Amino acid sequence: MQRVEIAEDWMELRPEYAEAVHVRPRPQPLARIELAGLGVLGIVFLGLVGRLMSTPLSRDENLFLTVARLGGTQDIYRDLGYNHLPILPWLLGGLYDLVGTEHFLLIARLLVLAGWATALGAIWLICRRTEAGFLAFFTAACLLMGNVLLLGGAGMLATNNLLPLAPALLAFYALLHGIGSSRPSPLACFAAGVLVSCAIGLKANYIFLAPLFALATLFAPASRGFALRLLAGTLPLSIGGLLAGLPVLMYVLFDTQSFFAHTLRYFTELQPAYWAASGEPKVDTLAAKVLLAESIWLANATLLSLVGIVALALIPAMRTNMRESVRLVRSWSVVLPLGLAATGFVVAFVPSPSFPQYFVPPIPFLILAVVLLRARTATPDLPGAQAVLGAMALLALVGGASRIGPGLVQLARPQQWETISLHRDMRALAREAGFSGGERVATLTPALALAGNFAVPPEFAAGQFVYRIAPYIPAKDRRYYTTTSAAGLAAFLDAAPPPAILISGEETLEEPFKAYALSHGYTGYRRRHKGRTIELYRRPDATPVLPPAGGPSTL
């Protein structure tokens, strides 16, 4: 006999769990249908891997890869122009140092893959903890891996868009342990606080996690006294969050103006000023943002999650009355993910202009709500709930098949992966131009420069993200930036002409770089890479370094 710790709100709906002591059945081996389900998820995950490794390098990745690579020796804000919270460049830079490889894009994409795997693992742990069943996990995994937004740039690139999902989901699992058991667990609440801070440190948009998690510990479970909830839940949660957030708080306390110049004021003043003056298409009005949100949230797997939540919540009402549906939903374990999703909906509209990746935050919490509603479903309603879950999983798989299928084909061709071929092509281009490695390069695509073994000056470490807003930096903040601008580019390059100028061929902002190279007698070299032409220019007096006779270049 052993005591089973089950939250009070679970007992309210599932009377068969009301006994304080019973024999927990031994874990049963997986049924054939479950093994088949795991096989399907494995195939989908492999397709996701192939897609992730083959997705072309993005403009956004330049910032994260380069700052992570150079951040060990230079300040990520003042020197390198980073504009997010610092957890990702620290994490990725640590991986670069640990692994010691020069395949920077490959390592970064593998980190994103680890984020996918960890998020799926967190969902499995939550399903196991709440006894939601295998079908709930299968459906949740299909909703996550079949989400078209996440199968695009938001989930396939080495940025900070997907990575916060893993610590956010793990934080919810820790909270289930902390306040969702018959005995409170301050240690689990402490871990939840640490994980919440990690999610926020990866992307500030997830700041809404902190107050909602704190409110959950203050008001749940209702059967415990307020003092116990405060001491065993809220207090350790807050301590864990503060301790994990100390590295970021150190920046705020000791370099306050620089930190806020590169983060808060960048997104609230500089970026809006650049886009207001830009003629590029943009989503900057409320009406346009609503249309973009509609195209994302009311489509594919996200719409399935919304429909599933409504269907699962109304099944008890269809059997008896609306009171049973209210009883199903009113638990903190359902209200919290619904509240997180609702807040995520609101937060998505804050940045301007809007981009698709800003609409990611509600998605994991909608999936959580589906899992928790299934976990709280009463026995008479289980057949209907299972049918809803099965239909959702099938439709999510169908919706993602057009992207997962080609990913399986790409997985079988590792030499064509972007993470491999970009490194190979850039090294070949550098050899052709006679560079031996470590030469200083002027470029707005520093990830290409890293792949070619060039040295990236701090002025270009952020790619175009600081360069393009340079004219709008107010005088009071200029001392916090290391950059140049289109107007001052020629004078900047004349002061110390770089041995190399690198053009990706995809940015109009690169035209002054190319014009400078051509007007100053640089020798041009070109290489095709997956439909685009990468151009590398060598300064006339830069001594070419030939490959060793009789063998391949050491590049």
Image: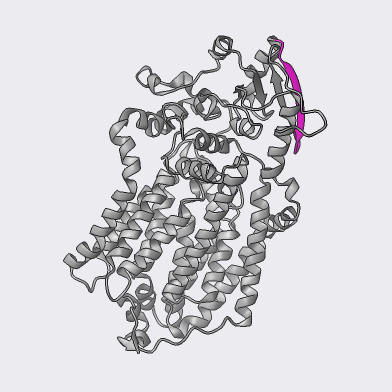
Q: Residue at x 50, y 33 (%)?
A: 70
Q: Residue furthest right?
A: 550
What range of the chain is rendered magenta?
A: 521-533
Front in this rendered view, residue 281 or 231: 231
Relative placement, left or right, of 258 versus 404 is left
- Counting every numbered tag in the picture gives 0
Q: Specify the quadrant of the image occupied by residue 59.
A: top right
Q: Main secondary structure of the magenta part?
A: strand
Q: Is residue 111 above or below residue 405?
A: above
Relative placement, left or right, of 457 versus 208 is right
Front in this rendered view, residue 495 or 220: 495
The quadrant of the rendering that contains the N terminus is bottom left
Q: Residue at x 32, y 58 (%)?
A: 213
Whether residue 313 is visible to the viewer of this picture, yes or no, is no
Whether residue 178 is visible to the viewer of this picture, yes or no, is yes
Q: Position of residue 130 (x, y in %)?
A: 42, 74
Q: Position of residue 343 (x, y in %)?
A: 39, 52
Q: Residue at x 38, y 74 (%)?
A: 328
Q: Position of residue 301 (x, y in %)?
A: 57, 60
Q: Is residue 261 above or below residue 200?
A: above
